[in-house]
């Protein structure tokens, strides 16, 4: 009886812990600004995460996917990790507030629902259209008050485009995984995902040519947190919650991530939002909640 009580308590607390831990990923992107080149940071992070995930896979003695499934897992990693994180890390390092970009990427369920139509032959419900309209309205309220038409530095057309591109990438990767790479154990699948993501991040780094890493305590702390806590522990926590049947609860709580991120960046970096932007964030939360309740789709990042 006592064990069942502890398990019930853990299932109640774990989704909130997941949301808080996931939100710290946006804080890390802000923390490393000026210390590590953002894409180079990911070029180092992904191979390290792959090594940790490999250790977990060997410890679990998890089965390895076939070559075909390994390829699909690698492609999934390219979109869900590299092409998702590289744009938004670069945008944050060039002045876009982490709380704002968390809001844009938090609209992933909206994009996922619409991408599932051509890829998975799913039907768009009226609530999806309602969520899209509400979400666009909310994002507009957040972005427009501080929109600048400079090339870089803050909320600009370039950083907004990168945020949208990253969100579309993770949405596409989510649907791609569901169609081509479902059923792969998370640990061994994660090895191949991080392999694909690492190669992609290193290629982008070579193209950009920025290898800054000042070896400061802040840089190493950000790297350690990103690899061990975000790329390994948080993903394994997600796996445990999925195995415990808490997927729908996680999906419903996805709308909390932007607000938690905004609070963290305010306390840590002093990032502030105007009242109209806070209103827009609340509207976006409603949009995501509408879509999640309509679809009950898994939260996959």
Image (tube, rainbow, N blue to C red):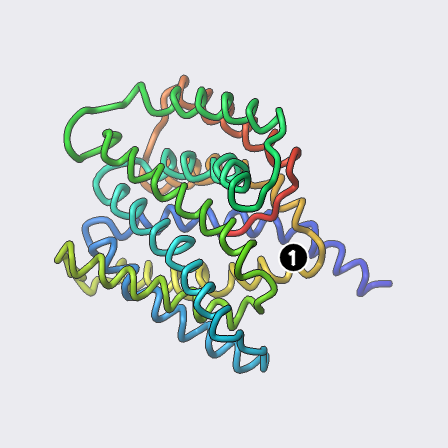
Q: Is residue 163 left or right of residue 74?
A: left
Residue bearing the label numbered 1: 242
Q: Residue at x 59, y 32 (%)?
A: 124
Compared across the picture, whether 132 is left or right of 241 comes to left
Q: Secondary structure at mark 1?
A: helix
Q: State whether residue 50 is above or below residue 159.
A: below
Which residue is more in the foreground, 12 or 301?
301
Q: Residue at x 36, y 21 (%)?
A: 274
Q: Find residue 135 and report its horizontal and vertical position in percent.
A: 48, 26
Relative depth, front residue between 124 and 26: 124
Camera-nearest residue between 99 and 163:
163
- For this orientation, the residue located farthest to the left is 209
Identified at 58% across, 42% down, the residue is 121
State left or right for residue 299 relative to residue 155. Answer: right
- Residue 37 lies, with reference to residue 169, above or below; the image says below
Number of numbered labels in the structure image: 1
Provide residue 48's location: percent of width, then percent of height: 36, 71
Residue at the far right in the pictured view: 1
Location of residue 230 (image quadrant):
bottom left
Packing grade of label 1 (10 A; few <14, some 14-19, many >=20) is some
Query: Residue drawn at (40%, 51%), measured in percent from left and top?
Result: 25
Q: Is residue 220 above or below residue 31?
A: below
Q: Tell me residue 209's x, y (percent).
A: 12, 58
* Quarter of the N terminus within the rendering: bottom right
Q: Is residue 288 above or below residue 18?
A: above
Residue 191: percent from the left, percent from the top? 45, 71
In front: 51, or 171?
171
Q: Residue 161: which quarter of the image?
A: top left
């Amino acid at each position: 009886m006592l064990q069942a009580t502890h398990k019930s308590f853990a299932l109640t607390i774990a989704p909130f812990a997941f949301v808080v831990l996931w939100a710290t990923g946006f804080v890390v992107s802000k923390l490393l600004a000026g210390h590590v080149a953002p894409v180079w940071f990911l070029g180092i992070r992904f191979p390290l995460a792959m090594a940790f995930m490999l250790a977990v896979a060997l410890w679990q003695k998890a089965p390895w996917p076939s070559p075909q499934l390994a390829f699909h897992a690698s492609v999934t990693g390219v979109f869900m990790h590299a092409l998702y994180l590289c744009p938004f890390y670069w945008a944050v390092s060039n002045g876009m507030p982490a709380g704002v970009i968390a809001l844009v990427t938090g609209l992933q369920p909206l994009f996922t629902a619409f991408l599932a139509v051509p890829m998975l032959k799913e039907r768009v419900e009226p609530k999806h259209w309602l969520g899209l309209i509400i979400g666009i309205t909310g994002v507009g309220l957040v972005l427009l008050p501080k929109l600048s038409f400079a090339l870089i530095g803050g909320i600009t057309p370039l950083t907004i485009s990168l945020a949208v591109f990253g969100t579309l990438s993770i949405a596409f990767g989510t649907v791609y995984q569901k169609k081509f790479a479902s059923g792969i154990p998370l640990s061994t699948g994660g090895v191949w995902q991080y392999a694909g993501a690492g190669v992609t991040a290193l290629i982008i780094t070579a193209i950009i040519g920025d290898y800054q890493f000042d070896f400061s305590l802040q840089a190493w702390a950000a790297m350690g947190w990103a690899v061990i806590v975000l790329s390994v522990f948080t993903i394994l926590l997600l796996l445990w919650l999925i195995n415990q049947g808490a997927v729908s609860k996680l999906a419903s709580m996805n709308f909390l991530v932007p607000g938690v991120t905004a609070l963290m960046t305010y306390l840590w970096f002093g990032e502030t939002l105007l009242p109209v932007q806070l209103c827009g964030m609340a509207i976006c939360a409603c949009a995501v909640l509408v879509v999640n309740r309509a679809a009950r789709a898994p939260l996959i990042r």
